[in-house]
Image: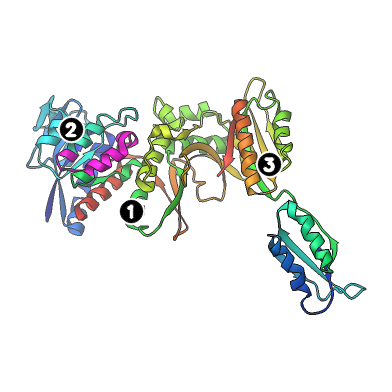
């Protein structure tokens, strides 16, 4: 989140306080005193983790406190996991396998590499999954486990 | 000098290997610990060697190598090991008969007989431990004798003794590792050479790394049994082999290993106990620079502890001399306890 703060005491605290009040976890704060804007405001870049549902409330609160929010960027899928599948991956409808993850709303298949040694032989696939958080990743992995079991695929998870 | 009479039940690769190492290390054990292990009986499936004055362990080892233990002057044909344990005066019984994970026999009866006869037991045999761990532990306790089984998990690697004697103040939160050298060898070779499973398996069989019937190793059963022992001994669980989720390595393809490798991973058969979850054996992706990513026939165990953090030990998981190292460590520790 990029903010622009007035050059007077207490402004940074005013900006950071609501983040913790809304249950956010501040990862880093960059305070660019040397890069004042033409209006004389100080750019501040804050990175924090927060429950997606609470973000809007936080933004409204900060605005009502008189803080200028220049930009909000969201990295929604923070968790990454890699799995390998072995079996008849294509013929057990790989599109459906991917759809089941993508349709959760909290996880997506981000990368897929498939190796097919020959007709009738087992294929192997390496799948990268991203999810919004740790719990969501566990749910996505469990979903993939169940799918692999149903489609008779061997799923290899990382330690 | 403290004379400690011992019996060895099961005089195969491990049992006769222990006899050899006891003979070779005799002077060291005497001078360092003041202990003189005296072999007074050997139990085999077709008879026993009984000699209360002491059997020369090296002589017995050599006779066994020649397949001629029955030519030993003290050989008693047809005598069974149960009677040997009951009747011959000894402090410690080394149980090294072949593993049977379904019934635990004959090791289970040997151990129970030894406990009832107030004899300590040191063993490498996973079968009885996988079948009746808590029962055996309670029997040993009731009879006031020691029960040690370091050699049953990870061969030479000192994992149980490490936890008992060195990490006393730690809570062990989790354990994961490679507990089967055969699987590790197969996966390592498949990965580095790009060879199919069947090919590497035959190679391993020719080298004597895999058995003629490799099921026990490659289906993850051996790893699961070791995990059961760790779960019961370290976590105080009461699980048997049936309480473990097991997937082996037979479906792993060179293509899967290549895909893993391209992204910086190797595939290893990992046994894992985390918190209260069911112990699990499955092929897993391990980052190439992770402490668990050891190659060849090596074993490795990583312990997650509350005070010491992660502790990882690696070493040889099989072999007569390596396993004897653990058995001897248990023998000495029983004498010093």
Is the residue B21 above or below the residue B209 in the image? below
Residue at mark 3: A128
User: Do marks 3 and 1 share a subunit?
Assistant: no
Q: Quadrant of residue B229?
A: top left
Asked if residue B313 lies left or right of residue A70, the reply is left
Look at the image and tell me in which quarter the N terminus of chain B lies.
Answer: bottom left
Q: How is the image coloured?
A: rainbow
> What kind of element bears circle 1?
helix
Residue B87 is marked as: none
Which numbered disc covers residue B43? 2
Disc nearest the viewer among 2 and 1 = 1
Q: Position of residue B27 (x, y in %)?
A: 18, 53
Q: Report, in whole angstroms, how far the alpha carbon at label 3 lies from the one at label 1.
A: 41 Å
B187 on left or right of B2: right
Residue A136, x across and y down, in percent = 65, 45
Would residue B34 be seen by someone viewing this image from the given angle? yes
What residue did someone put label 1 on?
B164
Dominant secondary structure, magenta: helix
Residue at the spot 74% in from the left edge and 52% down from the top edge: A52
């Amino acid at each position: 989140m990029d903010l622009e703060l007035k050059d007077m005491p207490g402004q940074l605290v005013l900006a950071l306080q609501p983040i913790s009040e809304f249950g956010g976890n501040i990862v880093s704060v960059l305070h660019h005193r040397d890069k004042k804007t033409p209006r004389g405001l100080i750019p501040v870049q804050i990175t924090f983790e927060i429950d997606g549902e609470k973000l809007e409330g936080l933004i409204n609160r900060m605005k009502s406190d008189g803080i200028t929010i220049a930009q909000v960027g969201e990295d929604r899928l923070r968790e990454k996991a890699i799995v390998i599948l072995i079996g008849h991956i294509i013929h057990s409808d790989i599109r459906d396998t991917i759809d089941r993850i993508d349709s959760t709303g909290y996880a997506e298949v981000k990368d897929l590499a498939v190796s097919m040694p020959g007709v009738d032989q087992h294929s192997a696939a390496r799948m990268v999954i991203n999810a919004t958080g740790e719990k969501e990743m566990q749910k996505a992995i469990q979903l993939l486990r169940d799918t692999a079991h149903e489609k008779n695929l061997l799923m290899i998870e990382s330690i | 000098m403290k004379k400690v009479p011992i019996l060895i039940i099961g005089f195969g690769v491990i049992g006769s290997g222990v006899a050899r190492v006891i003979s070779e290390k005799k002077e060291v054990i005497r001078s360092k610990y003041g202990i003189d292990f005296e072999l007074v009986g050997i139990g085999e499936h077709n008879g026993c060697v009984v000699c209360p004055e002491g059997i020369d362990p090296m002589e017995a080892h050599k006779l066994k190598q020649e397949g001629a233990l029955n030519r030993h002057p003290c050989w008693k044909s047809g005598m069974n090991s149960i009677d040997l344990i009951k009747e011959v005066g000894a402090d410690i019984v080394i149980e090294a008969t072949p593993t049977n994970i379904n019934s635990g026999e004959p090791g289970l009866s040997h151990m129970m007989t030894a406990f009832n006869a107030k004899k300590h037991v040191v063993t490498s045999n996973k079968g009885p431990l996988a079948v009746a761990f808590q029962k055996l532990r309670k029997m040993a306790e009731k009879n006031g004798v020691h029960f040690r089984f370091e050699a049953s998990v990870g061969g030479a690697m000192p994992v149980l003794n490490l936890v008992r004697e060195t990490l006393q103040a730690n809570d062990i939160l989790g354990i994961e590792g490679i507990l089967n050298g055969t699987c590790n060898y197969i996966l390592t070779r498949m990965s580095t050479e790009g060879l199919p499973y069947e090919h590497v398996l035959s190679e391993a069989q020719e080298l004597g790394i895999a058995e003629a019937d490799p099921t026990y190793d490659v289906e993850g059963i051996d790893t699961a049994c070791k995990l059961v022992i760790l779960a019961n001994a370290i976590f105080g669980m009461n699980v048997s082999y049936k309480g473990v989720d097991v997937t082996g390595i037979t479906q792993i393809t060179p293509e899967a290993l290549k895909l893993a490798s391209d992204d910086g991973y190797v595939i290893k058969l990992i046994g894992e106990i985390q918190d209260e979850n069911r112990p699990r054996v499955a092929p897993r992706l391990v980052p190439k620079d992770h402490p668990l990513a050891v190659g060849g026939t090596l074993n490795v165990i990583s312990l997650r502890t509350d005070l010491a953090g992660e502790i990882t030990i690696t070493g040889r998981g099989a072999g007569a001399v390596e396993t004897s190292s653990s058995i001897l460590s248990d023998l000495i520790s029983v004498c010093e306890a």
